[in-house]
Amino acid sequence: MARIVDVLPLTPLQEGLLFHARNPDRAPDAYLVQLTVRLDGPLDTDRLRAALACVLRRHPNLRSAFRFRKSGEPVALVPDAVRLPVAERASEPAAVRAFAEAERSERFDLGKPPSIRCTVLTLAPGDHVLLLSCHHILLDGWSMPLLLDEIGMAYSAGGDDQALPAPARFRDYLDWRAAQDTGAAKRAWASALDELDEPTRLTEHVRPGPAARLTRRLDAGVSAALVTMARNAGVTVNTVCQCAFALLLARMTGREDVVFGTTVSGRPPELPDSDRMLGLLINTVPVRIRVPASMPVDELLARVQKEQSTLLGHHHLGLADIQRAAGLGELFDTIFTFQSYPVADRDTRWRDGPRITDVHGVDANHYPVSVTVAPGAEFDLQLVHRIAPEQAGLLLDRLTMVLTAFAEDPQRPAGSVDVVLPDERRRLLADWLDGAPRPRVPFAGPAPIGRPIPGDRVYVLGAGARLLPPGAVGELYLAGDGLARGYAGRPGLTAERFRPDPFGPPGSRMYRTGDLGRWRDDGQLEYLGRTDNQVKVRGFRIELGEIEATLARHPAVDAAAVVVREDVPGDRRLVAYVVAGSGDVTGVHEHLDALLPGYMMPTAIVPLDRLPLLASGKVDRHALPAPGPAADPGSRVPRTETERSVAQVWREVLGTEVVGPDDNFFDLGGHSLLAVRLIERLAAHFEIQLSASVLYAAPTPAGIARLIEAGESGHGPLVPMRQDNDGGPPRLILVHPIGGSTFCYADLAHALPADCSVHGLDAPGLADGTRPLERIEDLAAHYVAALVAAGAHRNCVLAGWSMGGTIAYEMAERIRRIIGAAPPVVLIDTHLRLGIDPGASDAELITVFADDWGRAAGRALAPDAAALAGLSPAERLDLLVDRARSLGILEPDAPAEYVRRRFEVFKAHARALLDHRAHQDHQGRVRMIAAQDSVRQDPSHGWSAVAGAEFDVRIVPGDHYGLLGGREVVDELGAALDWLRS
């Protein structure tokens, strides 16, 4: 490469594209953009080469080579000069499209500039096609027409830079972006996405291979009416189209609160000449729209315009940071864009050269569904998709239907807008009766699978009892000959469940089943669970019926029910109730543990003589008793006042009536969040700072009482979390995350295979008399010394969640230097670089600390950094302590010193991560377990650039804060331990 004259930082979108470009296979790159330009007249290809060289001189960023530094940081290296060849080919007009597609299938090596190709196809004398292909990492859709204008100006000037106006510099944009208030942007997006409980996913089945394209043209009258509608409502046409798409998404997903992505120009009006810059300035941001069925369309437009306008100043924030602020991982799988960028002039003549007669562009993205609306006398709707062709056509037809309904009546309620096409309506309401059933077939009741039986009807309805089209999720309603008259003697329940049937004969009724489902394209009904039986616990959506069905498979269980209880405020947990048959139910817990992921495990299993029932025969879930295990008949009474006091705290925290001094915390339904609460309560009661990790070694009131009486806190780096019979290898060493404690691994440690020992490593600084370490290297050295002293550094696997993975990776290298071989490392959703501003103030760091603490506890704890800015450090902590207490995260009498110490550890670890650079070319096995919802562009979270040849990635369900409760992480760690046995 030529001499490097500049090094440019990458935007977040460029970083993601660089990762995608490193795909080792030779599949076509989805991020290649292209212009096909028809030229009429004489074309001097030497002059064209001079023009292209001129453009590359004027815009240094177009000469960039994209590389990773040794630290793992991606950068753009700008050489002083590169050569852009111009290929010349003779072609037939009919072959141009195929040639363009073949050109797009050729990948770029982004490390070898320029990432632009130029081909001239000569169709006949004076008739040419100019193909400009480049990687999206260089240019966005806005820039492509500007590039063509630049080439035309340079061609007309004979490639003379001095004859052209000064160019707009991409470097100015990068400087502007670096000066923006990232903290304020994150807070704005977190507020905009607050209380969003799940992503919006339109499709579950993505078709492999290249994307297909489909277009529709909106009627000129409808297009004009939409423009008038926007003007009368005081909103943009973009807002009108976004609301129409949101309404369609709401109907298709069965939700009123939906999110999709949109592409913004990224060209701030306050930055001079930003509209003339060549580069990748666009950004993808989420659009959240709530679509109440009763709200008139024009009111919906006004509300959405107001909500979106508050975010205009924060469009520079990368999508990964926005999604991290929302805490849900990937928020959407659809993109909707209103095309507002410049369009190349189709009637421009270059001086002493040809005239442009036609321009066609191909843009790039990886989403399975991407809709673009191009305004004009007749709006053009384009769908780029990787879904089934028939679904794609229906999607555009339904969008056209919604836009037309908006134009016809802007005052109509949103719930009255129909999305069912006439052909679909005829199919949904068709009479299914085509013969009598055979006498041998029993009809004992409705089963929401397949098709309705003859004489009956099934509807899938959304909000406002509107029919939903195939593929959309809604509630199932039954109607027809088999419908009951109601609930005998229960007029209230009858009125609630039996509704007038708007689709049947006059006077007919339909029954609201409470089941969720959708019609498949083949006319079959797909059952998706119960509306009243899906719950969310610690960030996981759980089907209670699945747990009940698993319980019922145990041979000793005659009946079972599972509910979510909150007997202790702030502690939502699963409780199972079982009625035993003739067998022994003592093995039920082990039965569930073998078949369910950790996040679906009940914290208590309560045996009953019978389940309480309603008159309908269904379980009366409100009558199920709170779990309160009686003491073991062989249990002793407390021997000391300390044992008695500790047992009392146990009862208060666990919400149980009786606790014996030898009862195990985990057997009574304790988990990691309750453990922290327990330790806080004990600290306040006994004025001693205990480590939460002491519950591994002393999980009973008697054990804790002995520690308190001896004045021992249990603090120390190496924590025995669980040992097999002989306490020997193989060992799993779990390193703490940024908070410093390993108690987040409590449930995980108990779910791991029984034939291994599990140890944790807690951070210095959490206990009195210790200080936090501020370098990753120092933490790793401290922990390796503890392992060597205990003889635990051989035949082990090192693993860590989040920051813990970074420390484990550094520890493995230090152990390699001692024994000659690095132990295997498992990174559990660990990012190579910390997503915190290196210049963050203490006020901003305490907000990040509170956000991390709150997410782990399932609460929105973080205060606004602006509210903290004018406070002293002590006042900031007092404010945080008050918020934590009010939300039930912190015990009312827990000392503020406990929070101060946690924050100091968090702050030291954040600084350590920001200053750390992981070693390259690791000599040992490394596996990344990535949470599916936290994967944006790079499933390796940056580690593939440094972790060596034996690195691989496993993606598991869940988000960053919930994946430790999943069975998949247990399985992956078990597989890593198998590496030691093989």
Image: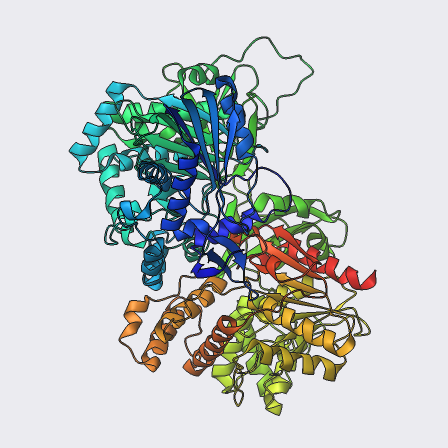
Q: Give how far across and how far down residue 729 sits, in percent.
A: 79, 71
Residue 916 appears at what percent x and percent y? 54, 72
Q: How many labels does the image show?
A: 0
Q: Residue at x 48, y 48 (%)?
A: 330
Please indicate whether residue 632 sits to the left or right of residue 820 in the image: left
Q: In the rendered view of the protein, which quadrant contains the N terminus?
A: bottom right
Q: In this view, does 3 lie above or below 144?
A: below
Position of 621 compared to 660: left or right?
Answer: left
Displayed quadrant of residue 304: top left
Above or below, 27 against 13 in this view is: above
Residue 980: percent from left, percent from top: 79, 64
Tell me which residue sits at (53%, 74%) in the image. 678
Q: In which quarter of the image is the C terminus?
A: bottom right
- Residue 763: percent from the left, percent from the top? 57, 78
Outermost residue, left side: 232
Q: Nearer the viewer, residue 637 or 325?
A: 325
Q: Is residue 411 visible?
A: no
The answer to which of 884 and 390 lies nearer the viewer is 390
Q: Is residue 331 above or below residue 965?
A: above
